[in-house]
Image (tube, helix red, strand yellow):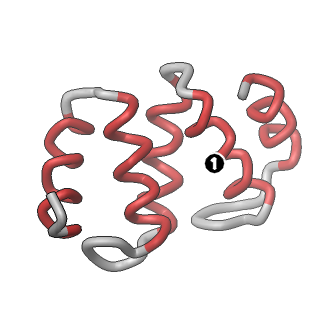
């Protein structure tokens, strides 16, 4: 949909069912404030869910967030691990 709020809602439904692509895309929407308020804590959580399923882009994005302490504490060791996986 062209409506970002509706896209965010639909990604939320799929993400809740464990779809890694939807979790990553919804994380990006929270990260950028598309279709609703920016929420870096939620973005980091969603990237983490997708990363745990082996989603390479989510692993990268989560690593960047951890490196820059966005949405949570800095974790350089985990950043290196995630970048190695991605």
Where residue 52 appears, as percent x and y from the top left, is 53, 25
Left or right relative to 30: residue 77: right
> Image quadrant for the C terminus?
top right
Where residue 34 appears, as percent x and y from the top left, is 35, 72
Question: In terms of image quadrants, where is residue 36?
Answer: bottom left
* Outermost residue to the bottom: 37
Say which residue appears at 28% left-offset and 27% top-offset: 18
| Residue at numbered disc 1 | 61
> Image quadrant for the N terminus?
bottom left
Q: How many marks?
A: 1
| Crowd class of label 1 (few under 14; some 14 to 19; many from 20; radius 10 Å) | many
- Front residue of 44/22: it is 22
- Front residue of 10/77: it is 10
Say which residue appears at 19% left-offset and 29% top-offset: 17
Say which residue appears at 38% left-offset and 33% top-offset: 21
Say which residue appears at 61% left-offset and 29% top-offset: 56
Residue 38 vs 13, above or below: the answer is: below
Where residue 14 appears, as percent x and y from the top left, is 19, 36
For mark 1, give the secondary structure. Answer: helix
Residue 71 vs 33, above or below: the answer is: above
Where residue 51 appears, as percent x and y from the top left, is 55, 31
- Front residue of 3/66: it is 3
């Amino acid at each position: 949909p062209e409506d970002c709020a509706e896209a965010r809602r639909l990604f939320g439904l799929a993400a809740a069912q464990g779809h890694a692509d939807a979790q990553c895309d919804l994380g990006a929407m929270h990260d950028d404030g598309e279709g609703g308020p920016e929420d870096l804590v939620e973005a980091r959580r969603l990237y983490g869910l997708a990363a745990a399923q082996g989603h390479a882009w989510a692993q990268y994005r989560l690593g960047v967030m951890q490196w820059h302490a966005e949405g949570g504490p800095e974790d350089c060791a985990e950043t290196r691990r995630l970048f190695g996986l991605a």
